[in-house]
Image (cartoon, helix red, strand yellow):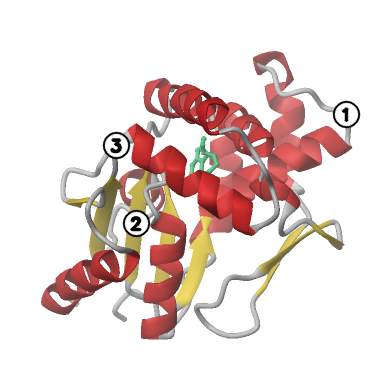
Amino acid sequence: MTPVPVITIDGAGGTGKGVVSQLIAKKLKWHLLDSGALYRVLALAAQKHNVSIEIENESALTVLAEHLDVQFVAVALGEFPRVLLEGEEVTNIIRTEKTGNSASKVGALPAVRSALLNRQRAFRQSPGLVTDGRDMGTVVFPDADVKIFLTASPHVRAQRRHNQLKERGIDVNLSDLVEELTERDRRDQERTVAPLKPAMDAVLVDTDFLTIDEVVEKILSVVKQKI
Ligand code: C5P
């Protein structure tokens, strides 16, 4: 039996991988996995259950990850899902930079990452999966059919994240955002397990001077050649 096809789209925050993945999943009518949302929900669950995110609490956080009661409710294939933690709507709350930062702390713990592996792989359902994150092409789906790694300069990424948050009604200071994103990138790149880096066989796409539609087009042309 041929495995269900997978397209992985990795990159740092603000490279546009979330919206690009969603548009591609929608176009192909495939499933969508926003793996960052899992780490964000876990960070929120830790806060809710008063487990502070420190290396000393790795086993408690791992238990939390194993039992994480999270639901992604999509209205249709390829649409952005609503996110529920223990039945409660957290779709917007998980998007703050504070939660992103906590997600990156919890994501630096190796046992936590292992606990989330199978949950992520379970999203590989017919007719196909588009997934975005930091280690989709390197660790979670090393046999993916197409691997993309998006890049963009720090200022462009901070500006995009700023606009995105504003659209969701979350107002933040741009220079604070640059600082927070830089710190988060450093942690994501320097961690010992599943650091942010392109897979050996990933196609690199610099998005600085491309619109979202141009990035989508570029990726779809790679998909056409490979799948
Ligand atoms: O992509 P997003 O900004 O939602 O991810 C939040 C954080 O979750 C990242 O900064 C990263 O530390 C962590 N993450 C991860 N592995 C993934 C996806 C996200 O470690 N596959």
Q: Residue at x 60, y 50 (%)?
A: 165
Q: Position of residue 100 (x, y in %)?
A: 61, 38
In this rendering, the answer to whether 131 lies above or below 116 is: below
Q: Which mark is residue 224?
A: none
Please, what secondary structure does the residue beneath circle 1 have? loop
Q: Quadrant of the N terminus?
A: bottom left
Give the amino acid at mark 1.
Asn
Q: Nearer the viewer, residue 74 or 168?
A: 168
The C terminus lies in which quarter of the figure?
bottom left
Q: Which callout, 2 or 3, points at the residue further toward the start of the chain?
A: 2
Neighbours of disc 3 within 10 Å: few (<14), some (14-19), many (20+): few
Let me know if residue 38 appears in the view: yes
Q: Amino acid at mark 2?
A: Ile
Spatial distance from mark 2 to mark 3, Cα to Cα? 17 Å
Q: Which mark is residue 9?
A: 2
The crowding category of the residue bearing disc 2, from other C-alpha atoms within 10 Å (few below 14, some 14 to 19, many at least 20), is many
Residue at 75% across, 50% down: 93
Check disc 1: other Cα within 10 Å, few if <14, some if 14-19, many if 20+: few
Residue 132 in the image: x percent, y percent?
43, 56
Disc 2 on helix, strand or loop? strand
Label 2 vs 1, first from the N-terminus: 2
Q: Is mark 3 within 8 Å of ligand 1?
A: no
Q: Nearer the viewer, residue 24 or 177?
A: 177
- Relative to the observer, which residue lies in front, 71 or 206? 206
Q: Looking at numbered disc 3 in the image, what kind of residue is underneath it?
A: Ser
Please state which of residues 81 and 115 is positioned toward the viewer in this rendering: 81
> Residue tagged by mark 1?
50
Residue drawn at 37 percent across, 74 percent down? 24
Q: Where in the figure is residue 223, as x and y percent of width and height?
A: 20, 73
Q: Position of 82 compared to 201: left or right?
A: right
Relative to 49, 113 lies left or right: left
Q: Please tell me the numbered disc located at residue 153.
A: 3
